[in-house]
Image: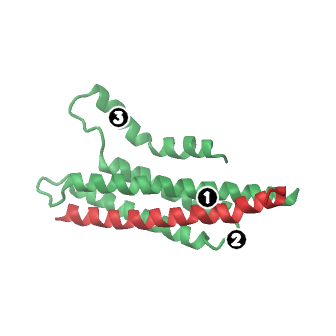
Amino acid sequence: MYGTIVLVICVIVGIIVAAVTISSVIDTRRRYYNDFMKRRGHS
Amino acid sequence: MSLCKWFIYMILLALSPVLCRLMIAAFVPGIRVVSASDLMTFGLILAITNISGLETGTPADDPRKSLHTGISLLLVVLFAAMFTVTCFAELPAHPVQENYVLYGGIIISAASVGFSYMIWNRIIASQTARARGRQ
């Protein structure tokens, strides 16, 4: 029973961490790489 | 710090308990190949290094700095709690299914690797942008 609780908590936290990771990767590309391309005159 | 250095200094260094166990398990029969406590150590090292990198490498005006620090702290607490759970598995009659804890450890460690990669990629990108801004 305790193992199931641990597994469920891990899956929930894993989904939260994955969601934050994906949204932050998109934000990083928008914030830093777009800025970098603008400075180089590519956009 | 490049992403190659991130892999060598963090992933391989944090994986050293897992790699040592793999090496011993290859030569000594009866030793398990993967242990949940080794995965917890791996995740703890990654999460603590993330906090250190966020404090020193991220610009103060980054709006996601607090979110990333909070998630890293959540991971530290979770890995420490799961390490405690693995200690209960040493009791003769314990109520914890070790396989489930191991599967949970694998899931959360994989998520931690992706999270750590994202954080260090962001730190490197922000440092590069700042350096180019100075030129």
> What residue is at 40 percent from the left and 37 percent from the top?
B19
Quarter of the picture containing the C terminus of chain B is bottom right
Q: Quadrant of residue B60?
A: bottom right
Q: Which residue is mark 2?
A: B60
Q: Residue at x 55, y 43 (%)?
A: B7
Image height of B27 relative to B10, above or below: above
- The residue pinned by badge 1 equals B53
| Left-right relation of B100 to A12 | left
Q: Residue flagged by tag 3: what amino acid is it?
A: Leu
Quick one: label 3, few (<14), some, or many (20+) residues within 10 Å? some
> The numbered mark 1 sits on a residue in which chain?
B
Residue at x-position 28% and y-position 52%: B102
**Cα distance between the residues tagged 3 and 2:** 41 Å
Badge 3 element: helix
Mark 3 on the same chain as mark 1: yes
**Mark identifier at residue B22:** 3
- Which tint was used for chain B? green
Disc 1 packing (10 Å; few <14; some 14–19; many ≥20): some
Q: Position of residue B43 (x, y in %)?
A: 43, 54
In the picture as drawn, the residue positioned furthest to the front comes out as A43
Disc 3 is attached to a residue of which chain? B
The subunit carrying tag 2 is B
Q: Earlier in the sequence, mark 1 or mark 2?
A: 1
Q: Residue furthest right?
A: B135
Of the pair B62 and B84, the residue shown nearer to us: B62
Give the amino acid type for the residue marked by disc 1 in the picture: Gly
- Give the letter of the red chain: A
Do the residues under discs 1 and 2 have CB atoms within 8 angstroms?
Answer: no
Q: Earlier in the sequence, mark 3 or mark 2?
A: 3
Spatial separation of the CA atoms under disc 3 and disc 1? 29 Å
As measured in the structure, the alpha-carbon distance from the residue carrying label 1 to the one carrying label 2 is 13 Å
